[in-house]
Each structure stands twice: as C-alpha cells, then as structure tokens.
Image (spheres, rainbow, N blue to C red):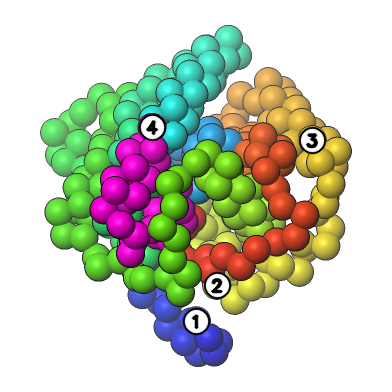
Amino acid sequence: MTKKKRLKQLAWREYLPLAATAATWSVILLSIGHADAARLLAAVVMVRAVQLCTRLATPMALKLRIQASPAVRRQSQRFAFICQTAALAIALALVALLTEGMKAIDQQKIAAFLPFVALGMPARYWRQADVRTASPYLRLALGVSGLVTVSLAWGLSWPVQLMGLAFGAREWVAYMVLRWWPRPPRIPKQSVNELLHFDEVARYTAILGRRLLTYRLTKSALAVFGPIGNAAARTSRGLNWHSRIEPYMPHHLGGFIVFSLSTLAGAAYLAVRSGEPAAMIVAAGVLQVSGAALNVVLMWPWLPDRDIDIQLGYDDDDE
C-alpha cells in the first residue's frame, strides 16, 4: 500500500473516530471537571490493560474458517465463545483486584469508576468470538456511541461515578450496531477446514502480541495526551514508524519476563507515590504496557520458532 493510500485510510478509520472521541471527552470534561475526567481516563486505561493481558486472538482463527464446512464453523464459533468467556471471567477478577488496590491507596473515585467501565467488557470479549462483527470501523462506532451515551448522561445530570457507566455502555452500543448491520467479512487468501483448538488460538495470540508490542508501547507513552496522542500512535502504526524501536525490545522469554514485571512494578510505584490524577494516567499507561507484555509471556510456549504469515487488519487490534 502506498503512503498516500495509507494516509487516506487513516483519515477515514482514525481521524473521524478521533473527532468523535475528542467530542466525547469534551462532554466528560464539561460534565465532571478535569480532575475527575483524568481519573476516569485512568480507569479506562486500566481496564484496557486487563484486556490486553487476557487477549485471545480468536478472530484470526475464525476468519480462516469462513469458507469451512458448516460443522467446522459451528465448532469454531462455539469454541471461540468459550475461550473468550473464560478470558472475560479472568479479566473481571483482575478488575476486582484493581478496584480493591485503588481503594487501598485511597483512590476511591478511580475504584468507583472501574466496575462501571468494566460493564462494557463482555461486549468487547464476545465480539471477538463473532466474525460477523469484524470491522475496521469499530473505533468509529465506539466514538459515536460514546458521544451519545455520555451526552445522555450529562443531560440527565448523572452522578460522577455513573459517567463510567455511560462510557462502558458505548461498548454494547457499538457491538449491537456492528451485529445488526454486519459488514461482509473479507475472505482471507488461506482457508482452513479443521476443528479449532486452543493451540492455534494461543499461537496466533503470541505472534500478534509480539508484533504489536512496540505499537502498544508507543500508544501508552502518548496516552497522557488523550485522543491526540492516540491518533499520533495510530498514525505511526499506519505508516509503520513504530517498527523502528522494535530492535530495542526483548526477543527472548527472560527479557519479556523482566520487561513485564519491571513495568508492572513501575506502574505500582507511580500509583502509590503520587495520588495526582495525571500521575494515575501515567501509571495506567505503564500498566497497559505491562499487560501487553504479560500476554506474550503467558502465550510464549505456543510461539513458533519462525513467524508465520498473518495479515494484520485494523479489526485485529480494536483499541
């Protein structure tokens, strides 16, 4: 793809959603003030960190079976749903631990936001088990639905804590939009007509997680700049600029373990040392990097010696 086409694609898939997301956070700022908006952003990024840690790449396996026999398609969809439900249960347990941790360090408002934001997690996980909802325009659906839900909450004068519920509800609205008006799935070049097993899901998860770690590191570093930082990170990804720091990332299991644990410790240190909202956003961003690295560590036994050909689409990393 030429650079001109990449920029055009970014304009439709990234910058329009950016405008909707910026408008959403503008409404949140007007509704609850900058300090509580920063705490809500920290809670959202923390939930995202949990999602990255428990992520399973079932969409790739399902796409490869679009043209498979009906029996194989039914089995793969059912198995993907079971995998995503198990990952969701683990993720909700981790959110509960994070909530208690925030209470322990006297971050009561972030602790209050977390469960409400997490109410959108089932829609996020179950969407990964439904190939009919795969779309590169998920972020646009999320941005517009978020603007609608938070505007409604502002108009109804909801309490501060319930703004997290409005933010979490956007996941369900976007899921229903994509489910009711599905985009015809893109037929992959390869096709598989075999039953789906966890080894395949874990292998794709490890490969995709390893490939995307440098992008997620860049995105987390820019998270403090809000939607503008998010757009800058995704522009970097669209133009493949983030690959320039890939040689400096760990390439062995030991390095990944050290990297993931050190970033986890860094996030905890920032959260404990400073209770300022801005510091909590930075801590949440570091936690997100740790979650992405831990996901690779957990799936490392299934990582092949040599990378395999996987075509990454925008719907494969729907953040």
Where residue 260 appears, as percent x and y from the top left, is: 74, 36
Q: Earlier in the sequence, mark 1 or mark 2?
A: 1
In the figure, is residue 74 to the left or right of 177? right
Q: Earlier in the sequence, mark 3 or mark 1?
A: 1
**Dominant secondary structure (helix, strand or loop) of the stretch shown in magenta:** helix
State the SS at label 3: helix
User: CB atoms at circles 1 and 2 under 8 Å apart?
Assistant: yes
Determine the image quadrant of residue 30: top left
Q: Which of marks 1 and 4 is nearer the N terminus?
A: 1
Magenta part of the protein: which range? 58-82
User: What's the residue type where badge 1 is placed?
Assistant: Arg
User: What's the residue type where badge 2 is placed?
Assistant: Gly
Q: Earlier in the sequence, mark 2 or mark 4?
A: 4
On residue 71, which mark appears?
none
Residue situated in front as seen by the camera: 280 or 258:
258
Q: Name the residue under label 4.
A: 82
Q: Name the residue under label 3.
A: 257
State the SS at label 2: helix
Q: Residue at x 84, y 46 (%)?
A: 252
In the figure, is residue 245 to the left or right of 189? right
Where residue 126 appears, as percent x and y from the top left, is: 33, 39
On residue 238, which mark appears?
2
In the figure, is residue 243 to the left or right of 262? left
State the SS at label 4: helix
Distance in Å between CA atoms under marks 1 and 4: 36 Å
Q: Name the residue under label 1.
A: 6
Distance in Å between CA atoms under marks 3 and 1: 34 Å
